[in-house]
Image (cartoon, grey):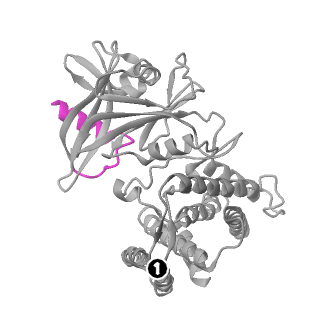
Amino acid sequence: MSVNDTVKEFIEQARWFGGKGRDFEVAGFRRLGTVGTDPRLDLDLVTLDYGDEREYYQLPLVHYAEPQEHLEHALVGSWDGGHVYDAVHDRAAMAHLLASFDTPPTEGPLRFERLPGHDLDLSTHSTLFSGEQSNSSLAFGDDALLKLFRKITPGRNPDVTIHDVLTRAGSDHVAALYGWLETDSLVEGQVLQLGMLQQFLRTATDGWDLALASVRNLFVEGDLHADEVGGDFAGEAARLGVALRETHETLAEHFPRETRDAAAQSALATAMGERLDAAVRVVPELAEHAPALREVFGRVADLSDVPIQQIHADLHLGQTLRTVKGWKIVDFEGEPAKPLAERVLPDSPWRDVAGMLRSFDYAPRVVERTHDDSDPDAADQRAFRAREWSKRNRETFLLAYADGPLGVDEQLLLSAYVADKAVYEAVYEARNRPSWVSIPLDAIAKVVAA
């Protein structure tokens, strides 16, 4: 089997590979740089050709002359007279990377950029996070977290550029950036950013998991309301609203701010309408709401001078972490399916708010549907409690974020973004979990009713 065929077989089975189910060929295999010796760590770039488009993936590969039993599960193949493994599973290889961030090489194609203010602990070893999907993340003791990007988009990764700005600005709502890795080996005339090193939030708990725990606590307390149970989430929702507002304020201070004129607003409304039309073909139940939604989108088109700025662009509870020092917002890459040029465009902060509101609506409905209880009376009670939890936390979050009542235009924009997000969710659910499509449909009905 050729090296290209071996690499293709490995990529097809990788958890981080985003092209599953599509036919492709390995059209290129390029060395970006080498770090360390004994073992040798190569950072390689693989070009995948789907026929109508190309994608790039990073492969950090460690080479050994003899088989490594402890790395058998990470074997990629054998070539150049040795055995090649996925290096994120090898602590010796990852120690080379950490040492290079501490003492960057003075020559070669790889650039290890560092921000001042933190001394790395080189005595720690790496631990790979097993749950990572689109990237590979490793903790070095309690000191640092390394995120290696797997799918590489030519150009500067917004996860790096935004963390850089927020860290230098002293934001309390992100993990501090320690540095990043990029290469002079240009692709499509653009720099390639390969990974980022940041503060490891050892005490962090996923915001989505905390919300689900709060809902389960409410369901157990059958005689109490959401504001009466010990696991009430409203205080956290309020703190998260403040964290997002302050993050948006910092981004507005350090990135360009613009206003979207009537023509641009019309284009936004048209795009929302086109997504709705496509969704109706997949989810026929949307048809009854389509006229009212088009009216909402049409009113958005009449707005002008709408403030836009750098935002998160893919925000939900799963992109938040609760630590002993407050809420942290993570993963500023934007929606991975969108081209980089679209992900870095400024947008209204209300898009981020809408994403959070939809997440607050989803959490109790997910628990409701996965609860193991066939009692119909109990099911009705859970449905009521789910609505109660969602309403309480959405309202609390929004009040804390806005720090006052919303203006008419702000409420209109928010409603449109919520509806647009729910339309996307309806298509996703229809294709993946048809019995859950009522969750976004109920949200759309509420927008229409309002």
Q: Quadrant of residue 25?
A: top left
> Could you say which is closer to the camera, residue 79 or residue 297?
297
The residue depicted at 40 percent of the width and 74 percent of the height is 264
Q: Is residue 381 left or right of residue 134?
A: right
Q: In which quarter of the image is residue 427?
A: bottom left
Residue 205: x percent and y percent? 64, 42
Residue topped by disc 1: 286
The residue depicted at 36 percent of the width and 21 percent of the height is 105
Q: Is residue 81 left or right of residue 368?
A: left
- Does residue 389 appear in this view? yes
Residue 335: x percent and y percent? 43, 56
Above or below, 186 against 49 in this view is: above
Q: Say whether residue 60 is magenta.
A: no
- Number of numbered markers: 1
Above or below, 284 against 343 in this view is: below
Q: In which quarter of the image is residue 391?
A: bottom right
Residue 309: x percent and y percent? 50, 61
Q: Is residue 222 left or right of residue 46?
A: right
Locate the N terminus by quadrant. Answer: top left
Q: What residue type is labelled 1?
A: Leu
> Could you say which is closer to the camera, residue 150 or residue 2?
150
- The magenta span reads 1-23
Q: What element carries label 1?
A: helix
Locate the C terminus by quadrant. Answer: bottom right
Q: How crowded is mark 1: few (under 14 residues within 10 Å), some or many (20 or more)?
A: many
Above or below, 81 against 58 in this view is: above
Residue 48: x percent and y percent? 23, 44
Q: In this view, does 407 lie to the left or right of 296?
A: right
The residue depicted at 53 percent of the width and 66 percent of the height is 436
Q: Say whether residue 4 is magenta.
A: yes
- Does residue 437 appear in this view? no
